[in-house]
């Protein structure tokens, strides 16, 4: 594949490509409207990515073209994806907040821990977090005050780049401060580190990492509904066990749906949310999720009634939501 195979095309040419090469119809969205959508509201790559949820003809005159795929379906999936990403980001922020609250509370209640030693041990093990990640917080307008208060930081010229960089010389930082300076990914390592030392990990790093991946995908505005087909993903044991206890979900359905990476990450996020988020916050956020899932998500369900993949995935997640919340 090279530049000749993928030339720059106008929105009008892209619509023609969808129609003539991909077999996409324009029953619900005329071609002119589709051109305007691709030009003004979304790009071709993002909109067309949802076609992976549809199958192609494997023989005959239409070989290689999609079966029963209309541009209106692609547009609707892109809109649903946008709304879902917004909800997921808010849910992941709730999870991060409550995980931090729990960790700080547990350290404060731990008679063997002063709040500083665990940070020293953690940064000794993960020195790259101190040298690269935490040093960078001294340059942020939101965290530089904390950084300079709890770290001794020198300004050093990098011999290779010639740039002036922050270098942490010493750390005198308690856990209730460092949790405000760490990224979600680095906080997860601290969380896992502390509870492993204590011999009791409430939520495994493997599960939290799935939540982080999903959060990052949504925060970076990736198309999370672009490909829901079953693949080879295997969910963590604790998540698979929790789903297996839902009586309305058959074993083969669980294995098939959870083999999709996106579905596995989303269900893992729901599992963690149900496990760690406070009841008051959980109530309001889940009401928001249910309103979307039972309302806007199926507003144009007629578009997808013949797509077993989309319908089956929707019903599977709906059963999980109903069972856990």
Image (tube, helix red, strand yellow):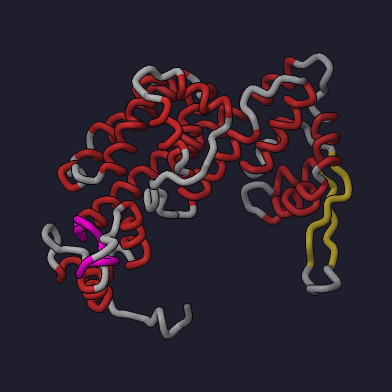
**The residue stretch that appears in magenta:** 60-72
Along the viewing direction, whichever of 226 and 97 lies nearer the viewer:
226
Q: Residue at x 81, y 30 (%)?
A: 118
Which of these two is toward me, 213 or 157? 213
Residue 40 in which image quadrant: bottom left
Which is more toward the observer, 83 or 31? 31
> In the rendered structure, does residue 71 fall within the stretch colored magenta?
yes
Q: Report the front residue among 117 and 1.
A: 1
The answer to whether 199 appears left or right of 70 in the picture is right
Q: Residue at x 15, y 43 (%)?
A: 302
Does residue 35 appear left or right of residue 170 in this picture?
Answer: left
Residue 156 shows up from this direction: yes
In the rendered image, residue 61, in percent from the top left (x then y), is placed at 20, 70
Q: Quadrant of residue 199?
A: top right
Residue 6: where, in percent of width, then height?
Answer: 40, 79
The answer to whether residue 165 is left or right of residue 230 is right
């Amino acid at each position: 594949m090279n530049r000749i195979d993928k030339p720059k095309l106008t929105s009008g040419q892209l619509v023609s490509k969808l129609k003539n090469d991909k077999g996409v119809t324009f029953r619900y969205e005329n071609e002119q409207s589709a051109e305007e959508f691709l030009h003004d509201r979304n790009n071709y790559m993002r909109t067309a990515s949802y076609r992976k949820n549809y199958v192609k003809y494997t023989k005959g005159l239409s070989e290689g073209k999609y079966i029963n795929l209309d541009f209106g379906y692609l547009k609707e999936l892109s809109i649903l994806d946008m709304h879902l990403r917004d909800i997921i980001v808010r849910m992941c922020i709730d999870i991060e907040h409550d995980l931090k609250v729990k960790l700080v509370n547990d350290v404060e209640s731990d008679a063997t821990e002063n709040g500083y030693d665990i940070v020293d041990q953690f940064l000794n093990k993960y020195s790259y977090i101190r040298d690269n990640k935490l040093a960078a917080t001294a340059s942020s307008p939101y965290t530089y005050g904390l950084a300079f208060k709890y770290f001794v930081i020198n300004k050093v010229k990098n011999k290779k780049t010639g740039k002036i960089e922050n270098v942490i010389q010493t750390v005198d930082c308690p856990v209730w401060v460092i949790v405000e300076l760490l990224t979600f990914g680095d906080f997860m390592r601290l969380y896992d580190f502390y509870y492993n030392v204590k011999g009791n990990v409430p939520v495994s790093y493997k599960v939290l990492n799935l939540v982080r991946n999903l959060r990052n995908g949504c925060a970076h505005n990736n198309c999370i509904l672009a490909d829901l087909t079953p693949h080879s993903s295997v969910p963590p044991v604790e998540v698979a066990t929790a789903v297996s206890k839902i009586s309305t979900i058959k074993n083969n359905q669980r294995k098939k749906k959870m083999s999709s990476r996106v579905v596995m990450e989303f269900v893992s996020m729901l599992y963690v949310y149900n496990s760690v988020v406070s009841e008051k916050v959980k109530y309001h956020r889940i009401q928001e999720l249910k309103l979307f899932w039972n309302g806007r998500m199926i507003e144009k369900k007629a578009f997808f009634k013949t797509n077993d993949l989309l319908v089956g995935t929707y019903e599977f997640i709906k059963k999980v939501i109903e069972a856990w919340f």
